Amino acid sequence: MFNRFITSAESLITKHEETRTGFLKIALEKKSCGCPVRKKCARIQSHGRPYENT
């Protein structure tokens, strides 16, 4: 057999709970990456300077 994990068509179906867990994991990862950028933008705005892309 070419793949020992795929034994039937049902092997390719992702369960709802697995999809939900994966989505939440990615969302939390993106949030943690975006927080420093948001804080930097807030700091720049509080100083009254236009945003500089550095």
Image: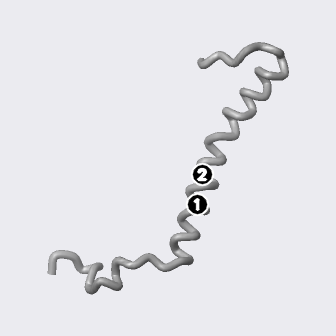
Residue drawn where x is 39% and y is 79% of the image? 13
The vertical placement of 49 against 38, above or below, is: above
What element does badge 1 sit on? helix
Mark 1 = which residue? Answer: 25
Residue drawn where x is 78% and y is 28% of the image? 42
Residue 31 at what x, y percent from top left? 65, 48
Residue 17 located left or right of residue 8: right
Query: Label 2 crowding class (10 Å Cα cut-off): few <14, some 14-19, many 20+?
Result: few
In three-dimensional space, the C-alpha distance between marks 2 and 1, rounded to whole angstroms, equals 6 Å
Q: Which mark is residue 29?
A: 2
Residue 47's quadrant in the figure? Answer: top right
Residue 43's quadrant in the figure? Answer: top right
The vertical placement of 46 against 12, above or below, is: above
Residue drawn where x is 30% and y is 83% of the image? 9
Residue 15 at what x, y percent from top left? 48, 79
Q: How is the image coloured?
A: one colour
Residue 4 located left or right of residue 23: left
What element does badge 2 sit on? helix
Residue drawn where x is 79% and y is 22% of the image? 45
Q: Number of labelled discs? A: 2
Is the residue under label 1 in contact with that under label 2 (CB below 8 Å)? Answer: yes
